[in-house]
Amino acid sequence: MGKEDGYSFEKLKGSDNYKEWAREMTFALRDAGLMSYINGTIRKPVLDETLKDLELIAKKEEAIDTWIQKDDRAVGKLGKMCFKPVQLGFKDHWSAKEAWNFLKERYTSVGWSSKWAVLNRLEEAHYETSNGIADLESSINVVLEDIEEQNITMKEYVTIKVINSLGPGFETYVTVLNEQARKENKLPDLGGLFKSLKEEELRMKDYERLHAIHGPRRGRSNARVACSHCKKTGHTEEDCWPLHPELAPEHLQEKFRARDSSTRIGSMTAGVRRTFIG
C-alpha cells in the first residue's frame, strides 16, 4: 500500500496526522476488501472439536487458514503505511483489529484541552448561527464523529456542562481549574468538582460577608494596642488595612486588594487540586 498500490497519502507518524491517516486508510482497506477484518465483522472461524466428518474438518481448517492469511495481509498493510517509530509499537501476535485499535487508542487526540474544545463546539451549535437545518445537522455530525473518536463519556460531557454553567464570580476559579486540568491532562472527577465548588462558594460568601460587616472607618492611632493580624502596633484587627483594604487611603487600596486576591487564588488552587487527587 502506498504509491505502488495507487495510494499517495502520508504514512502515520503520530497524533498530528492520525485523523487524516485513519480516514484515508479506511478507504484503502475497503478498496482492498480488508476492512471487515479491521472492524471485526469477519471473525476468525473456530474449529469445533466435536466434528467427526473429515470433509467438514478440512473445510473448517481451510477457512481458518484463509482468515489468517487475509488478516495478516491487513496487518501488513497497516504496518507499511506507518513510519518506523510507529511500527515499533506493533506486536507480532496482534490481529488486524487489535493493531487498528492500538493505533486509534495511542494516536487519537484525547487530551483534556481537545475534549473541552470538542464539547464546546457541541454547545455552540445553534440553529440561529447556522444556515438552516441541513447546515446545523452537518455541524452536529462532525462533532459527534470527534466525540466517538476521542472516546468522550457522558460523565465528561456533564463535567464540561457544569464548568461552563458557572456564573459570575467563578472566573478565577475556572482559570485555575483550566490550568490544573491541562497539567494533569484529564478532566476532574465530577464528585470532586462539586465538593470543590461548594467550598469555593462558602469562601465567596464569607468574603462578601466580611466586607459587608466592616464599613469605612477612620483609622485610630494607639501605640499601646497591637493588631493580631499584621502584628503591628497603633491599631486593632478591625482597623487593619491589609485585612480591610477599603479602610486604607486610596493609593494603598489596590496594593492590599492584589495581596488579598493572591491569597484567594492560592486557596482556590488547593481546592481545585483536591478535585483531581481526591
Image (cartoon, rainbow, N blue to C red):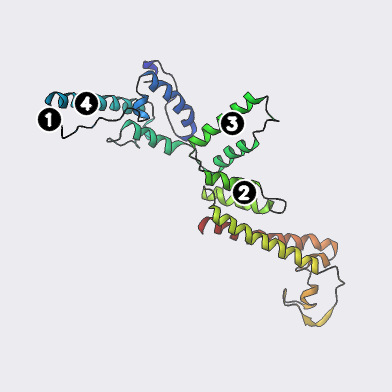
The earlier-in-sequence mark between 1 and 3 is 1
How far apart marks 1 and 4 lie (CA) works out to 20 Å
**Picture residue at 27% right of the left edge, 30% below the top:** 44
Quadrant housing the N terminus: top left
As helix, strand or loop, the secondary structure at mark 4 comes to helix
Rendered image: mark on residue 140:
3
Q: Which residue is mark 1?
A: 52
- Identify the residue position indicated by label 2 in the image: 162
> Amino acid type of disc 4?
Asp
- Residue 267 location, x and y as percent? 63, 62
Question: CB under 8 Å between callouts 3 and 4?
Answer: no
According to the picture, the residue beneath numbered tag 4 turns out to be: 65
Three-letter code for the amino acid on which mark 2 is drawn: Val
Q: In terms of secondary structure, where does tag 2 sit?
A: helix
Task: Quote the CA–CA distance across marks 2 and 1.
Answer: 62 Å
* Cα–Cα span, label 3 and label 4: 43 Å
Cβ atoms at labels 2 and 4 below 8 Å apart: no
The answer to whether the residue labelled 3 contacts the one labelled 2, judged by CB atoms less than 8 Å apart, is no
User: Could you tell me which residue is drawn at 66 percent across and 47 percent down?
Assistant: 165
Residue type at mark 3 is Ile
Which-is-in-front pick, marks 2 and 1?
1
User: Picture coordinates of residue 91 (x, y %)?
Assistant: 30, 37
Q: Is residue 248 left or right of residue 133?
A: right
SS class of the residue under badge 3? helix
Disc 1 is placed on an element classified as loop
Q: Earlier in the sequence, mark 2 or mark 4?
A: 4
Tell which circle, 3 or 2, labels the residue nearer the N-terminal end.
3
Tell me which numbered mark, 1 or 4, is placed earlier along the sequence: 1
Distance from disc 3 to disc 2, alpha carbons, whole Å, reads 21 Å
